[in-house]
Image: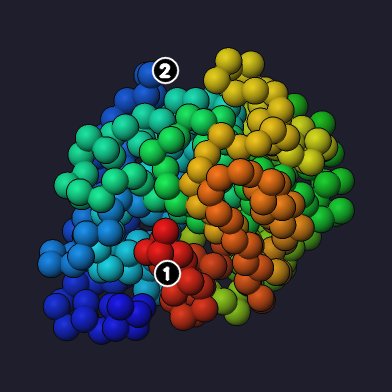
């Protein structure tokens, strides 16, 4: 069934493809669970549409400082809704990088060892699907943590992965590679968190300094959170998307979707960028220091996709990960550079349902 016939049949049956207020998604339940290190996390669970062919469970992993609902902008056709309509049991994970769970100074290692194995176990216990294995759609820093986990052999139940923007070999443009260490040596010494919400309320001295810098350099729109996100996540005007890809409602909605990210994660990101690959920092025995050098311990099939206009992570990094995976003796991999798209608009763009989602759904259905 094509994305368009799915849309048509859903509209006829009265099922909404959109989230009316950006928070309360229709038909969605919240499912809490606990990790081995006693972090309380949850899923936003969207079951398959009744009567649809059983396609099995699919887990979504958002980026850091956002949340599960990020995949569900309020005014466009969303990928989770289309997958539910196609028969997938959709589990939108709020891992420890979510702004909807208790804040902590986490690293990729913590999520790799504790969050994703627990999440997979929880889905397998709860899903009503009879299709074996779990598929995954992972994004940004969530993709880094997830890739560290699956490449370490911690997620043998995952059969298929769509990774967006970056995976195991993060690269950024030259301007961002200069800006990040400077920010860590200055602002990073005065705070534990970088937070785009400081565009709306700057509650500390470091927050006011950051807000002043954003006001000096960013004049591309009147959305303070959009501009602060651009300042924090790379160099661009804006950085995370192209304004012409977002409709007005989505651009306004993102004000509530971006908040605190611990400086600990930016420090690890800096080490990864310097090494040209994921670098574990906690010393957990489950993750080898050379996890991004050795053959990945997974036979899952991967679609590595990245917008050609990505201003957060350079598209060459995703190509590098794809090439790394081609050396595997098991599993398949595809690489897709999405012409004209950026970091996050492959999920939030007003034309993503036509330009991006059909290939993602076909990949998930075909594996
Ligand atoms: Zn904007």
Residue at the disc numbered 2? 37
- Badge 1 element: helix
Mark 1 Cα-neighbour bin, 10 Å: few <14, some 14–19, many ≥20 = few
- Badge 2 element: loop
Q: Residue at x 69, y 46 (%)?
A: 327
Give x and y (percent) for residue 281.
67, 23
**Mark 1 vs ligand 1: CB under 8 Å?**
no
Pointer 2 or 1: first along the chain: 2
Mark 2 Cα-neighbour bin, 10 Å: few <14, some 14–19, many ≥20 = few
Q: Is residue 153 above or below residue 30?
A: above
Give x and y (percent) for residue 25.
27, 59
Q: Is residue 15 above or below residue 8?
A: above
Q: Is residue 31 above or below residue 164?
A: above
Q: Quadrant of the C terminus?
A: bottom left
Residue 44 is at least partly visible in this image? no
Q: Residue at x 86, y 46 (%)?
A: 178
Residue 209 is at least partly visible in this image? yes
Give x and y (percent) for residue 288.
65, 23
Q: Please tell me the numbered disc located at residue 362.
A: 1
- Return the residue nearer the eye: 202 or 127: 127
Q: Tell me if 32 is positioned left or right of 249 in this view.
A: left
Check the image and name the residue furthest to the front.
329
Colouring mode (rainbow / by chain / secondary structure / one colour): rainbow
Q: Residue at x 22, y 35 (%)?
A: 125
């Amino acid at each position: 069934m094509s994305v368009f016939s799915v849309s048509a049949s859903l509209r006829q049956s009265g099922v909404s493809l959109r989230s009316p207020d950006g928070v309360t998604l229709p038909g969605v339940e919240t499912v809490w669970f606990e990790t081995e290190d006693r972090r309380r996390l949850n899923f936003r669970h969207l079951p398959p549409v009744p009567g649809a062919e059983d396609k099995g469970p699919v887990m979504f992993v958002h980026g850091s400082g956002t949340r599960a609902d990020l995949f569900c902008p309020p005014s466009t056709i969303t990928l989770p809704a289309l997958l539910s309509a196609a028969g997938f049991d959709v589990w939108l994970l709020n891992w420890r990088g979510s702004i909807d769970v208790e804040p902590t100074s986490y690293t990729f290692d913590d999520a790799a060892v504790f969050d994703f194995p627990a999440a997979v176990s929880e889905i397998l216990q709860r899903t009503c699907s009879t299709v074996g294995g779990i598929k995954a759609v992972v994004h940004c820093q969530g993709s880094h943590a997830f890739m560290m986990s699956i490449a370490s052999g911690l997620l043998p139940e995952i059969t298929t992965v769509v990774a967006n923007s970056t995976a195991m070999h993060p690269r950024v443009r030259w301007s961002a590679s200069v800006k990040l260490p400077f920010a860590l040596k200055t602002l990073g010494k005065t705070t534990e968190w970088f937070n785009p919400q400081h565009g709306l309320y700057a509650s500390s001295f470091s927050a006011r300094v950051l807000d002043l810098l954003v006001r000096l350099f960013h004049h591309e729109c009147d959305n303070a959170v959009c501009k602060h996100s651009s300042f924090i996540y790379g160099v661009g005007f804006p950085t995370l998307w192209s304004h012409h890809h977002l409709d007005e409602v989505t651009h306004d909605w993102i004000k509530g979707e971006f908040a605190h990210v611990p400086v600990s994660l930016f420090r690890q990101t800096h080490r990864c960028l310097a090494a040209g690959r994921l670098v574990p920092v906690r010393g957990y025995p489950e993750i080898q220091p050379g996890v991004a050098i050795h053959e990945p311990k997974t036979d899952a099939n991967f679609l590595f996709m990245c917008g050609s206009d990505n201003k957060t992570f350079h598209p060459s990094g995703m190509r590098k990960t794809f090439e790394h995976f081609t050396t595997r003796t098991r599993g398949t991999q595809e690489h897709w550079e999405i012409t004209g798209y950026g970091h996050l608009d492959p999920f939030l763009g007003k034309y993503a349902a036509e330009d991006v989602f059909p290939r993602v759904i076909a990949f998930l259905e075909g594996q």
